[in-house]
Image (spheres, rainbow, N blue to C red):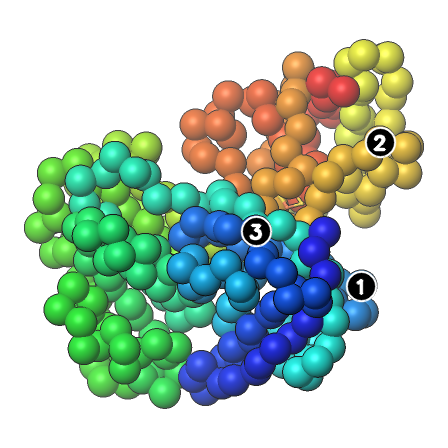
Amino acid sequence: MLDVVIANTQPLAAGICGLTLKSVDGSCLPAFEAGAHIDIHLPSGLVRQYSLIDPSRDDQYQIGVLLDPQSRGGSAEVHGLEVGQQLSVSEPRNLFALDADAPHALLFAGGIGITPIFAMASSLRSEGKSFELHYSARSRKSAAFADQLSSQADCFCYFNDEDNALDAMRVLTQAPVESHLYVCGPAGYIEHIFETARQLGWAEERLHREFFAAPEVVSEDGDLAFELVIASTGQVLEVGEQDSALEVLEDAGFDIPSSCEQGVCGSCVTRLTDGVPDHRDSFLTTTEQASNQLFTPCCSRAKGNRLVLDL
Ligand code: FES
């Protein structure tokens, strides 16, 4: 864990607050690559993940946070933080890294999804690599970095209130062969880009995405109770209709790393030896989910009445 102090706060756009964090003792912070995020431990005890914006600086971390009335409280708390306040943050982790061998990168950002995508564009530009950035937002006023990006030839901005919309089919059809695409934004936006790419036959390994909030998963039957069996000991734990598997494991004394608790970050991924999970995370790829070998206990459940965990 790193102890940091808020060195600066500034609006990046309407409703988006930029925070600059420096180490408390003035030392350099651990380096990171574009796409990385940190967990921020807020004074209330909430832990939230935010993408880091500028990989070229090792003396500070910069994040951008949208004030979201639908959020579970984290964004409002961040907006209330003040210069000089101290926080604990995790070391950077990167679950959304650029593929170093891709000949061309197509970057797509929806709304506040611009934060990791902006870092990717800066990094690709500084390395002289080929990319295009497509950024969709409600309005120019609500779009962080809009002025900076609009003036660059390889960046294309789309604003709802200016009546220009992204034509994903056109962009993907014209992309150079073997391009990789990277999307961050709301679930529906990511789904649209991914579905378009799949229709055009893009291979799954060329598709990369990061949700900034978990899409809501609604079970038609309601949640059912199931059993977790611990493979090494045979211990059986009951997960009630209202419980999460993660809570049950923690109550039984298992130390499962966790962070987002909504299936986004991948911290809690646990191996399975038997059973079919009802995957509700946004972290595992379609192939990983279909393998039935991995499980995110923070949000996923069981399709049958038991899962055997490789613990
Ligand atoms: Fe983040 Fe489970 S804690 S995916």
Q: Cβ(mark 2) to ligand 1 < 8 Å?
A: no
Q: Which of marks 2 and 3 is nearer the N terminus?
A: 3
Classify mark 3: residues with Cα within 10 Å, few (<14), some (14-19) or many (20+).
Answer: few
- Amino acid found under the numbered disc labelled 3: Pro
- Of all residues, the one furthest to the right in this rendering is 252
The answer to the question of whether label 1 and label 2 lie on touching residues, with beta carbons closer than 8 A, is no
In the displayed structure, 4 sits above or below 284; it is: below
Residue 125 location, x and y as percent? 24, 58
Q: Name the residue under label 3.
A: 30
Question: SS class of the residue under badge 3?
Answer: loop
Residue 29 location, x and y as percent? 58, 56
Left or right: 111, with 275 as reference point: left
Q: Nearer the viewer, residue 195 or 293?
A: 293
Residue 267 visible in the current orientation? yes
Numbered disc in front, either 2 or 3: 3
Q: Which residue is drawn at 73% across and 77% down?
A: 85
- Amino acid found under the numbered disc labelled 2: Phe
Residue 84 location, x and y as percent? 70, 80
In the displayed structure, 230 sits above or below 126; it is: above
- Can you tell me which quadrant of the image ligand 1 is in? top right
Q: Residue at x 44, y 33 (%)?
A: 286
Q: Cβ(mark 3) to ligand 1 < 8 Å?
A: no
Q: Distance between the residues labelled 1 and 3?
A: 23 Å
Disc number placed over residue 254 in the picture, else none: 2
Q: Name the residue under label 1.
A: 45
Question: SS class of the residue under badge 1?
Answer: loop
In the displayed structure, 289 sits above or below 115; it is: above
Question: SS class of the residue under badge 2?
Answer: loop
In the displayed structure, 9 sits above or below 92; it is: below
